[in-house]
Image (spheres, grey):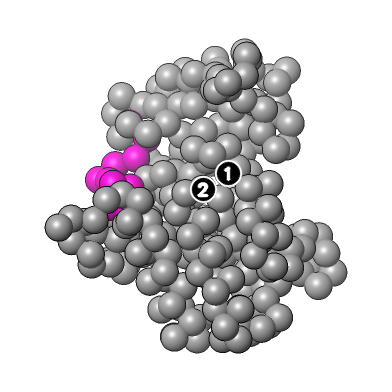
């Protein structure tokens, strides 16, 4: 019997956390960045279980969104800011999900509109870990799942024009059960971009981030992650 997508997410979260603890990549006293979304939440829960069982102590977490912060508070995991002296702007490890992952372990993140804080956390982690179900593993990224580009509201028109010139099809993300655009945790808007043809992902990350008015893009290429991908047959690929 094949595992559902939801079951794969729990499997990969549990496997990754358990494996990283067993291998000594997660240990007591660590500063850990915790991601956002439906795959990251089971990982937060699994981490909390190990803390409750006494396997881990003195874990200092940095949350990438209000969702993650709330989960940490519910599970009793202490939450800090990247700016807190005890964190010092640097983390030992960060773990998160992804919306798409290509064979080079380049990722799209930001389906949950938290990619700016995720990038601050994950680009400042010594070890970055991505966990995902099988549907997130793709040959090329950017042609199907949209790449989120967080922008200053005043720059919406100018940024859109520049993105179109780069071959993108930008669409302003609209709220659900809310009239008007999505407003991020940082108070900005998001343009979701797709391309008809495959893109050079690292190059596109730099190009988009060079546009005036862009806060950050959801392309993650600079801190290559260790990736765990759950399969429908119950296995977990590691790469």
**In the image, is 73 to the left or to the right of 220?**
right
Tell me the tag on residue 97. Answer: none
- Inspect the magenta stretch and tell me whether residue 139 lies in it: yes
Pointer 2 or 1: first along the chain: 2
Query: x%, y% of residue 88?
Result: 78, 68
Q: Nearer the viewer, residue 185 or 191?
A: 185
The reply to whether discs 2 and 1 touch (Cβ–Cβ < 8 Å) is no
| The N terminus sits in image quarter | bottom left
- Mark 1 highlights which residue? 115
Q: Residue placed farthest to the right in the image?
A: 85
Magenta residues, start to end: 133-143
Eyeballing the image, is 114 above or below 124? above
- Mark 2 highlights which residue? 37
Tell me the SS state at disc 2.
Answer: loop
Q: Is residue 131 in view?
A: yes
Query: x%, y% of residue 66?
Result: 68, 47
> Residue 139 falls in which quadrant of the image?
top left
Eyeballing the image, is 38 above or below 198? below
Decide whether the magenta segment is chiefly helix, strand or loop: loop
* Residue in the image at 44% along x and 86% along y: 22
Query: x%, y% of residue 35?
Result: 56, 55
Query: x%, y% of residue 61?
Result: 68, 66
**In the image, is 69 to the left or to the right of 198?**
right
- Inspect the magenta stretch and tell me whether residue 45 lies in it: no
* Residue in the image at 62% along x and 19% along y: 178
Q: Nearer the viewer, residue 163 or 23?
A: 23
| The C terminus sits in image quarter | bottom left
Label 2, label 1: how far apart the Cα atoms are: 11 Å
């Amino acid at each position: 019997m094949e595992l559902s997508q939801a079951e794969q997410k729990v499997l990969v979260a549990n496997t990754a956390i358990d494996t990283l603890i067993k291998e000594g990549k997660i240990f007591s006293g660590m500063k850990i960045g915790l991601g956002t979304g439906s795959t990251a939440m089971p990982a937060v829960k699994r981490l909390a279980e190990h803390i409750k069982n006494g396997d881990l102590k003195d874990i200092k977490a940095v949350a990438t969104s209000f969702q993650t912060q709330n989960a940490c508070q519910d599970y009793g995991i202490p939450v800090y800011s990247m700016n807190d002296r005890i964190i010092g702007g640097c983390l030992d490890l960060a773990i998160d999900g992804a919306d798409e992952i290509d064979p080079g372990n380049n990722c799209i993140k930001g389906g949950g509109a938290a990619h700016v804080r995720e990038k601050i956390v994950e680009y400042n982690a010594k070890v970055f870990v991505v966990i995902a179900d099988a549907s997130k593993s793709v040959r090329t990224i950017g042609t199907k799942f949209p790449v989120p580009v967080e922008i200053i509201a005043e720059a919406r028109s100018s940024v859109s024009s520049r993105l179109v010139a780069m071959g993108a099809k930008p669409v302003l993300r609209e709220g659900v059960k809310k009239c008007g655009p999505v407003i991020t945790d940082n108070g900005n808007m998001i343009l979701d971009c797709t391309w008809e043809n495959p893109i050079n992902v690292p190059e596109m990350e730099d190009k988009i981030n060079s546009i005036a008015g862009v806060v950050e893009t959801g392309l993650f290429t600079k801190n290559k992650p260790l990736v765990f991908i759950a399969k429908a047959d119950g296995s977990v690929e590691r790469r």
